[in-house]
């Protein structure tokens, strides 16, 4: 089935909740039930995917709340995940790392120095250390050195306060959630909102953790089976920058896998450890994509692999990646859209303040116009309105 065939009229429909939230309605949205559907119904539209019909039933292009709604709340907290849903995100992302006693928790990195108040806890001062993770030396506090009970004494905080000062308002409000807590939360939210809550779950540094006896895939598969999210049509994507992690998961569960791809010259860390000479540039060739399609359903490339920037930081011409991936039956979920100037291509920045919002809609128009199937966004409401602009023209 071609990309054009998948973009059926039912899937072109758009969600008006994003616009309502921009106007300050997020608090009211959080209090209601079925809020996204109700807001869409007011506009005579519906973005709700077909229940139980798998990832092909999702809207195109879909919007993935990156670490929740990281543009508005401290990342990887239940508050951030809930706000992403209130803003209308189709899917909400979790990154998984383990504790010393083997529990999977939601943090973008195992280094929790910048995302928790651990530095303010004198009882954990001696835990500060230097480690080498995937070839990079890091100094701080790491989840694998804490039991879950210890980790639960910490509070989450904004990772980049200099850029997102407003988010610091919520510092200390939430703890670090376990993935099991997220699964329970997603089921409760699904009942409250009257729809499936889709998750996009990443295994972080899987080779590193396996070397410590804390393998992620088996623990993740066990939880997915416990909560009925292990099937091919379950509302979950499984993602990793290490292809072997997706291959391992494919043997444990049937949920769709997505291989994440960083810069063209980079090498997946499991390739480095295995002596595999291939780079990301090799994986985005038709041959490389065909290999990925043998065990995964999609790729999550950096946006630069979809539209490269020139030497000045401006967007150039799109590559053939979207066409080539679709030819192998793969969906594309590139990362990451953010509204701030600092994260936008040079030609879409406004003014000189790196923390100010630039022309995010202009940049999104370029990226979504390539035919990608979805996009990770710190600002789901912005991305949803851009998707609405695109699908309204189809």
Image (cartoon, rainbow, N blue to C red):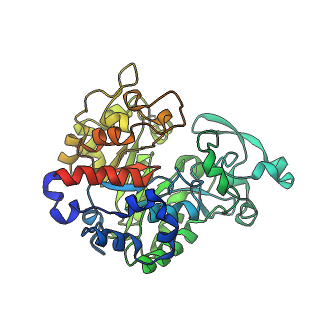
Q: Residue at x 24, y 70 (%)?
A: 44
Position of residue 361 relative to residue 252, above or below, is above
Residue 7 picture location, percent across and down: 18, 57
Q: Quadrant of residue 254?
A: bottom left
Q: Quadrant of the N terminus?
A: bottom left
Does residue 274 lie above or below 211 as drawn? above
In the image, taking residue 39 as reference, residue 331 lies left or right, namely: left
Total marks placed: 0
Depth order, front residue of 169/108: 169
Q: Toward the viewer: 69 or 253?
A: 69
Of residues 135 and 119, the one nearer the viewer is: 119
**Residue at left offset 68%, top offset 55%:** 171
Residue sitting at 30 percent across and 75 percent down?
Answer: 51
Residue furthest to the front: 23
In the image, is residue 332 above or below residue 197?
Answer: above
Specify whether 391 is left or right of 258: left
Q: Position of residue 12 (x, y in %)?
A: 21, 60
| Viewer can see residue 57 | yes
Return the x and y of residue 365 as percentages of the image width and height. 29, 42
Which residue: 37% across, 75% down?
195
């Amino acid at each position: 089935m071609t990309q054009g065939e998948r973009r059926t009229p039912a899937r072109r429909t758009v969600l008006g909740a994003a616009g309502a939230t921009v106007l300050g309605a997020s608090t009211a949205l959080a209090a209601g039930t079925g809020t996204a559907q109700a807001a869409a119904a007011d506009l005579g539209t519906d973005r709700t995917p077909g229940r139980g019909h798998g990832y092909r039933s999702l809207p195109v292009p879909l919007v993935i709340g990156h670490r929740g709604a990281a543009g508005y709340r401290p990342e990887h907290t239940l508050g951030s995940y809930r706000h992403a849903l209130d803003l209308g995100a189709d899917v909400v992302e979790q990154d998984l790392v383990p504790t010393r006693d083997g529990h999977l928790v939601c943090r973008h990195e195992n280094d929790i120095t910048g995302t928790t108040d651990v530095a303010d806890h004198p009882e954990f001062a001696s835990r500060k250390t230097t480690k080498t993770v995937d070839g990079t030396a890091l100094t701080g506090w790491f989840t694998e050195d804490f039991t879950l009970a210890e980790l639960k004494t910490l509070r989450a905080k904004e990772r980049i306060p200099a850029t997102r000062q407003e988010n610091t308002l919520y510092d200390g409000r939430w703890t670090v959630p376990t993935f099991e807590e997220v699964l329970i939360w997603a089921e409760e939210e699904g009942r409250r909102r009257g729809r499936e809550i889709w998750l996009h779950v990443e295994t972080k540094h899987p080779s590193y953790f396996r070397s410590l006896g804390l393998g992620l895939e088996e623990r993740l598969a066990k939880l997915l089976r416990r909560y009925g999210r292990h099937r091919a049509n379950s509302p979950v994507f499984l993602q990793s920058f290490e292809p072997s992690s997706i291959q391992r998961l494919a043997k444990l569960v049937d949920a769709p896998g997505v291989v994440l791809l960083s810069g063209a010259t980079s090498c997946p860390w499991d390739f480095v450890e295995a002596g595999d000479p291939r780079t990301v540039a090799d994986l985005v060739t038709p041959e490389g994509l065909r290999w990925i399609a043998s065990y995964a359903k999609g790729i999550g490339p950096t946006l630069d692999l979809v539209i490269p920037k020139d030497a000045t930081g401006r967007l150039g011409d799109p590559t053939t990646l979207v066409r080539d991936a679709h030819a192998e039956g793969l969906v594309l979920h590139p990362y990451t859209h953010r509204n701030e100037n600092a994260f936008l291509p040079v030609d879409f920045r406004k003014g000189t303040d790196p923390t100010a919002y630039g022309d995010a809609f202009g940049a999104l128009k370029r990226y979504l116009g390539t035919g990608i199937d979805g996009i990770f966004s710190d600002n789901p409401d912005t991305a949803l309105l851009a998707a609405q602009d695109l699908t309204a023209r189809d």
